[in-house]
Structure formats: structure tokens, C-alpha cells
Image: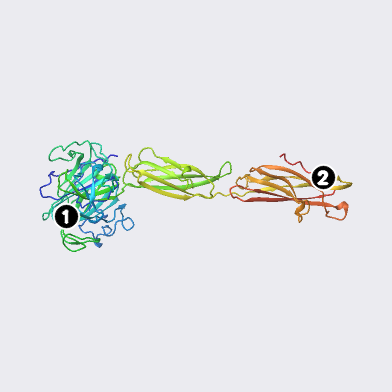
Amino acid sequence: MALNFVGFRLGSSLAPEEGVRTAGFWILRSGWTLLTWAVLAAAPIVGSPALALDVDTLNLFELDANPQDDANNEPDDDWDTPPDGANGGSVQFTGIIPDVGGAGDKIFAGNNKDIHEINTWTHKPGPLTGPDKNDLTNAYAAAYESGGNTVVYFGADRYSNDGDAFMGFWFFRTKPIVNNDGSITGTHTDGDGVNGGGDVLVLVNYPQAQGATPEIQVLYWETSCARAANNNPQPGQCADVNLLLKAKQTAAACSAGVANQNFCALTNAGDVASPWDYTPKQGTDDVFPEESFYEGGINLSILGGDSCFSSFMAETRSSKEYNATLKDFVLSDFELCSVAIVKNCTAGEVNEGETAFVYTYDITVTNDGSGSLYDLTIVDDSGTPGNTADDDTFTLAGPLAKDASHTFNGTFESTLNPPTNTATVTAAGSDGGATTITDSDDDECPQVSRSPAIEVTKCCTTALTVEGDNVVVAVNYSGQVCNTTGGAGQPAAIGLSNVTVTDDSGTPSDASDDQVVFGPASLAAGICQGYTGSYLPATVNDSSPDLATFTDTVTAIGTAPLGFGQATDTGSDTCPICNGVCPDPPAE
């Protein structure tokens, strides 16, 4: 992913003067713990007025060298609001991250430098042995979207204000891991050799002199840089090994009187109350002495391309030099990439074998973060979250651009009616990076309804037959049984199993002489089958032989699959001792 600087219009590009405090911040495309204190200032951008905005006057966040919210500056957030999305408008907030300073604290070990690869960095237990000005106490950052721009506000405080401070912010595109064995796992994301596109380091040099203002330098990780171009590199030139200078600006303090400050920073000129626990080296608890609290802002969109960073690291440095030794650090996830997934289970049907249901669904994924997403994988659980064997998996070839969406369609089978269907998406903020960006959504599928139906007809005739030594009347009957689902005006088709037709032999109250004259058998929807039977009636319906009639009833019953229940129907007929002929039943 390319991060292209559109260009800067700079004043005289002065090298940092001796005695100036320097601060730097890396912005990574993957996750770390957060920052140290920093100050950033913006130069106007040439040829891209759409990106020219003042991070100090966007009605997003208060940059006033005070962490307390000013009621006169609403709706701006501040660090004590907090800007957590629920109470503020941020899309990401680290929270106030304490750098414990004692047991459990981690500091850089050995000769670690910004020009080195991440996996060569090492750490050891704190606290920092000195100088105390390099000891971080808390750090914090919040990201906002404004007019298509990604604006990040950041801050940190330090244990001592005794002396110049040299600091940096890394914005990483991946997520370095601080291991218990003293190693740090991770690699920088490289730029393209010209326009950047990799990890970003913001160095802030803040002099301690009265009325001093910060100098800010923005650099890319760029492995094509083998060494510094010269002793005073200019934007577009290599500043040191692996570092390409993209911009630098003196007098970069946030100022409402300066237009189009795409980055700037401030520090407190006097005592300021701390909203969180803070103990200075000298002074009153929960009060920041002068030049102990730092905050700033940067419009990441001035870098061009996307702002799909994943973590922040704040660091303190031994000097203003690009190859200065690193001292303390705070690391935090800061995922500016985001993906949203919406799952819709739209319809359900009985499968062809009537053994399960087939559900149709669609899944829409949307890139609602600050930069392109890569390596998207969507997994649908087919309504069985505990069984991954039947999961459906979709992948998206190529990146998904900011604000873009893509829809996938699929079907799955389930014996549940209805199932709840869940889909999950994972993505990376860089091509081949860790797929740590995720979202999930579920939807209850529509319930499938079927109303099984059966119909039975009956016709009877009488005839004389010999029974032993006697001539008796026999009742012969026939008819058909039909599965009547699926026809015009009928319930939706469903098969029936265990279909039987039982005749009561003219004695409905006596089940001992009942006869099963059909089945058990299966009937598909819309299919009819014939049946025949006979019985010797035990009674007649009239005492006069010439008026005698015989009545019997057949009962048809069938069971629908998938829990749709049973269907039943009855058919009766009365025939006199002498009657006509029944129609032929359908062939079985």
C-alpha cells in the first residue's frame, strides 16, 4: 500500500539547534503499546488543498496543553472526556496507558536505534536508571475521521522535566510483540523507495528554553536508504540508514492563528492538574509541572495513500540525532483499519431428499476504516458454530479499498428450523500482514413452513359369497389415497411416509376387526395410490332385508419429515344389499 506525500511547502529547512529537546513517534501498520510525549507541527501542503486542514480547529479535540476538557470548547473532546467513541467522536482510543516505572516496567536494552529493524530491538525490566527526563509515565492517542482525512491526537507525560527531551512516535502497520525473554518480534513495513507507504516515524525536538517551539520531522521506514544523503537532509532525501525524510518544520507549535496546520504539538507552560494518577519527580502528586505534559495532532492523510496503521509506540531518545540510542517506550494497539460485516439469511427450502433444509444467504463486508484492507477471509458457520467441517469460506482477491464493499452469496444445509447463522471476516492492514482486523454478524434464518395434507376416497358394493355352508353378503370397497400437497391452491409440497389406510369393517367402536388395506408406504407430493378391501358385515342398518345397507369408514394417515407433523383424512360410503359398481382405483 503506498503512502504518497503530496508535497510540502516549507520555510527554511533548519537543522535542529543544539540544546533542543527532540521527540519522535513511530506509527506502525501493526500493533504495539503506545507512545511517549511528542509535539507535531504542520507545514502547508502544495497542490492538494483538499488535504489542507488545521488539526487544531476541527471541533474534534482540544489542543491547549491541558488534559482537562474546557466547557467553552465544545463539542471538542479532551483526554478526560474520554474520546472513546461512546462519549466522543473518535474511531479509536488507546485509553490512558500507564508506564508503571517500577516492577513490570519495560525499557529498551542495549544499543537499540530507530534505524534498526524491530526484531533486533531488545528490552529489559525497568525502571529507567536515568536520566529521569527520559522516563515516561503515561501515554495516549485517539483517532478521528474528518472530511475523508484521518486525524490522530496523541499525548504523553514524563517523570521529570529536567532537561531537553528527545522523543519519537512510531506508527506501525503491523503489531510488534514484546516477549518475556527480552526480545521483540516484528518487522517494519517497507516503503516504495519514493513515496513511502511503510511505517512512519515522527520525531519531535522540543527545546526547554523560554518560549521555545518544537521542530517536527516526519520519516518513512525505507530500506533503499543506505545512509544519509548529507549532513542536513531535506524532504525527499535519506536521513539515515532505513529512514527517508518526508517533511520537517520548525516553529511547529499548535496555534489557532496559523492556518492549515496538518501537524502540531504543545507542552504545558505552567502547572496543570492531571486527570489520572501522576507522580512527578519533584512537585505535587497529580499535577504536571511545566513541560511535563505533551499533546499534539497530525493529519495522517497528508502522507498520501491510506492510514491503515495498527499500533503506536512512543519512545524517548538519547539525543536529536537520527541514530540516537532509544531509552524508554510505551506500546499499544491502535488499529485504524476496520471492517464491518452484515449477514442476511434470506430464504429457506426443504432439500431435494427432504432430509434437511437449504438456506440461502448473503454476506456484505465493508471497509469502514482508514485504509485499504488485504487478505480478506470470510467464514460462514452454516448454522453449526461447533462444527467447522461444514463451514463455507470465501476469500477476496486483491485489496478492499477504503469505503468499498463486497457481497458474497451462498447456501448451506441444516436440520434446524430455523438456525442462527454467523459469519466472521478477518483482514490485514497490509499485504501479507497479520489478519488481526475482524468482525462478525449473525442472522436467524426464516422459518420454513409446510402443512402436510392427505385425502382418501371410498366406494363400496355388495355381493353374495359362500362362507362355509352359508351364503352371505360381502361388502367390497375400493378407493384411493392422495398426498395433496404441492398442487394448485395446496400447501407447499412435502412427502409423506408411513402412509396407511385402515378400514373399520363397519364397526367403528370395535377396533379388533379393523383392516389395514394400504401401506405402510411413502407418497410423494401430488401422488395418489389405490386400495381395495372387503369384509363380511356383522350387522345391517335395517331389519328389512330388502332395505339393508352397509356402512364402513376408512382412515388414511401419513407422517411428514423434518417435524412437520401428520396428515389424516377419512372416507365413508354406504351401500345397499344390491348396488352398482365402483370405479376402478388408480394403479399402484
Mark 2: few, some, or many residues within 10 Å (few <14, many ≥20)? few
Q: Position of residue 57 (x, y in %)?
A: 23, 54
The reply, left or right, for residue 372 in relation to residue 509 is left
The reply, left or right, for residue 472 in relation to residue 208 is right
Q: Position of residue 471 (x, y in %)?
A: 88, 47
Q: Where does label 2 land, which residue? A: 580
Closer-to-camera residue (427/316)? 316
Q: Position of residue 193 (x, y in %)?
A: 23, 36
Query: In the image as oriented, which residue stretches furthest toward the bottom?
Result: 284
Helix, strand or loop at label 1? It is: helix
Q: Is residue 537 visible?
A: yes
Marks 2 and 1, Cα distance to the nearest angstrom? Answer: 116 Å
Q: Looking at the rendering, in which quadrant would you find the C terminus?
A: top right
Mark carried by residue 132: 1
Q: Position of residue 475 (x, y in %)?
A: 81, 47
The reply, left or right, for residue 381 in relation to residue 227 is right
